[in-house]
Amino acid sequence: MVKKREDNLSNIIFSNMMGDDSDFIPIIADGDDADLKSVDVPDILPILPLRNTVLFPGVVLPISVGREKSLQLIREVNRGNKLLGTVAQKNAEVEDPTIDDFYQVGTVAQILKVLEMPDGSTSVILQGKGRFEITELISDEPYFQAKVKTLDDVIPMDSPEFDAIVGSLKDLSLKIVQFAGNVPPEASFAVKNIENNSFLINFICSNTDIKVEEKQQLLEIADLKERGVQAISFLLKEVQMLELKQDIQKKVKNELDQQQREYLLNQQMKTIQDELGGSPVEQEMEDLRKLADEKNWGEEMEAHFEKELSKLGRLNPAAGEYSVQYSYLQTLIELPWNEYTEDVFDMKNAEKVLDADHYGLEKVKERILEHLAVLKLKNDMKSPILCLYGPPGVGKTSLGKSVAKSLGRNYVRMSLGGLHDESEIRGHRKTYIGAMPGRIIQNIKKAKSSNPVFILDEIDKVSADFHGDPASALLEVLDPEQNTEFHDNYLEVEYDLSRVMFIATANTISNISPALRDRMEMIDVSGYLVEEKIEIAKRHLLPRQLKEHGLEDGFITVPNKVLEYLVESYTRESGVRELNKKIAKLVRRVAKKVAFDEVVEKEITREMVREYLGVEEYSRDKYQGNDFAGVVTGLAWTAVGGEILFIESSLSKGKGAVALTGNLGDVMKESAMIALKYLKANAEKIGVKPEVFNNWDIHVHVPEGAIPKDGPSAGITMATSLASVFTQRKVKKGIAMTGEITLRGKVLPVGGIKEKILAAKRAGIKEIILSDENRKNLEEIKPAYIKGLKFHFVKDIMEVLDVALLKRKVDDPLKIN
């Protein structure tokens, strides 16, 4: 029987696994299940612990024996019935195991052959015969002996499901042999040719590359069908792992092949380029190095550039990183490091340039000249950043250009309107695709000097969102203590902005963050007077439009009266932008006549203006008179300058209800209520019976309801209108007023006095009522512009009523009771 099995040994290798003390090679002898059951197993068996493997019934494998107990056991058993029990150790590291260190279920084994090896070691070939379970340990000296109980395998008979399980095991085993490179090809031959299903399952379970614990789990399953199903789950995991490894190795191989291919092609290209006269990549690096030698940067910056240049030399020119690195080095080269234009501190010339480019704005030009004078004396740019704020079209941006012209500096402008991404200021890190420096550094590069006049236009239009807050990034730019080391994310090095003259512009300062506003010196650039607009039109706008339309300077003339008519009837702004458009339209009509060889009048008249520009667009700023009680003229400020407005009050029989209309804001509504409460509290002082307020409904309306109106400056106007309608005393002709009131009747100062007075003069107003505290504001206006106006400075509302309301005639009885 032993000879038959030795003859059938195929010496088929499935995988190399650890045995008791060294490597072993599993072998299987094919046969039938009766061969295994024919062995007579005694009740007490010598126990041989195995490390790193589990012996299955039917499987033949050689074991290298090293431990003294194991050697003695093998020799004695080999001289006897050649039967022993093999059990797997739970921990292979234990050199001298006890009964608790190995599993209780094992395999009865028969010694087929004991081999004395040339190196002095002993190997034994065992064949599994059947499963057993240890019931009691008899002795552990000189080797382990235990009482055992044999366990029979449950073999399904004529089961298609069992046949399918065996087939799946075969397919998965063959797939593992295909994927695993270290498995001999004879393994697939063994799997294909084992005909006994139970032998095949045990063979696969024994040789699967799984943990000893999992093999022991398979050995303890009595039903071969369940053992096969469990083995399939382990094999599926193994197949998935091998497939994943194969995919990874394939990808790595492809990448290596591609890199080797690129390397060979680059080497060939380099050889060809050397033959043709040099590599363009090396030429680019040489050009960059020459440009760097001409730069006036410090040692630290020079070392940084050399480091980045050497990094460029190590990159493959075909790689995407090469172009990114090259663009970065080009940016460093193009920046004007420590390159400055020489300032021309000729103060008289600066004054001359400012006067030539801008008419009026005396206070603004004076402040700019003071700023330049400090720079001349101190020669230090650490001075407050200027912020010019005012309505559109008054020349804030062009003032900055004039400053650059007077100093002899380069000029750059950056519009901040709608900016909402902090990266626009600080730039993107160069690791991002399409990264570039922030707009500050881009404009410095464009200026070609490190001390330009830098206009930050529309700084009040900066907004914040999830990309960050650009206004916070501007704090570093506009702080003289910090901008010596401005950090741009793209550059990765600090850039000195301390000698840049920053001039910001804004329409309103309420939208600028307090921290940013604190870093700037605010200069109010208010609107132009009508007289100033006339001079600007004559000196600048008309000559420019004649030149732009191909006409000679002085081809046509516009008298002052016609210009005044044009300004008042066709424009409504603080600046001159709209006026410039109207003059351009006039000149286009003249140019058209010239092109058609028609007769052209050299002097523009009012009738020609009306013909060319159409009907008058603005006429509501004209004083309309106060022919009815309750109608009062007020003064208001808007972003485009001052305006006059009319407040109307009327009474109707009722119970004292109050209606406020005209698209009024909360503050203006509160002013009306304060005025009404004051009049109720002082009814007798104004000659009205207190019960009158309960017998009449009050309606206060401010015309042009489509335009929102708000603010406290209409307080005294509201009070005068209500007092007029209740007393039926009309308001004097040609009078207007502005001021805030309190419940005590005090008249408080308001802003925008200059613009309001100019609006009153344009409208033909002769007298103006102001708070006594606004007296100082008249000093800002040239006497010529307020000539003909009479001012009344008041402290409380009763003084306002005394000045504004006409005396009631004796024969004109009061009809309001």
Image (cartoon, rainbow, N blue to C red):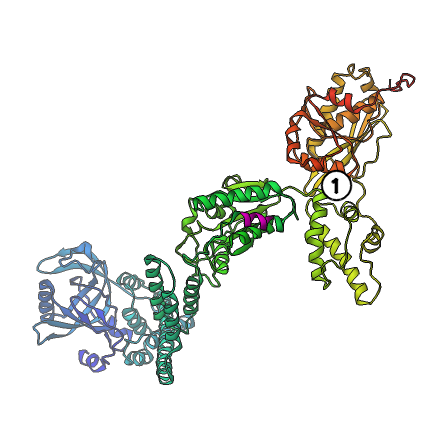
Vertical comparison of 169 with 217: above or below: below
Which residue, given by chain and number where applicable, does mark 1 sit on?
Answer: 707
Observer-nearest of 796 and 151? 796
Q: Residue 578: where, in percent of width, then height?
A: 72, 51
- Most frequent secondary structure within the magenta stretch: helix
At 79% from the left and 46% from the top, the residue drawn is 561
Q: Quadrant of residue 686?
A: top right
Q: Quadrant of residue 128?
A: bottom left
Vertical comparison of 293 with 583: above or below: below
Observer-nearest of 642 and 592? 592
Q: Please name the amino acid that badge 1 sits on.
A: Ile
Report the side of 724 relative to 507 (left or right).
right
Residue segment shown in magenta: 348-354
Report whether residue 798 is seen.
Answer: yes
For the C terminus, the image quarter is top right
Q: Residue 816: where, in percent of width, then height?
A: 87, 20
Report whether residue 463 is seen.
Answer: no
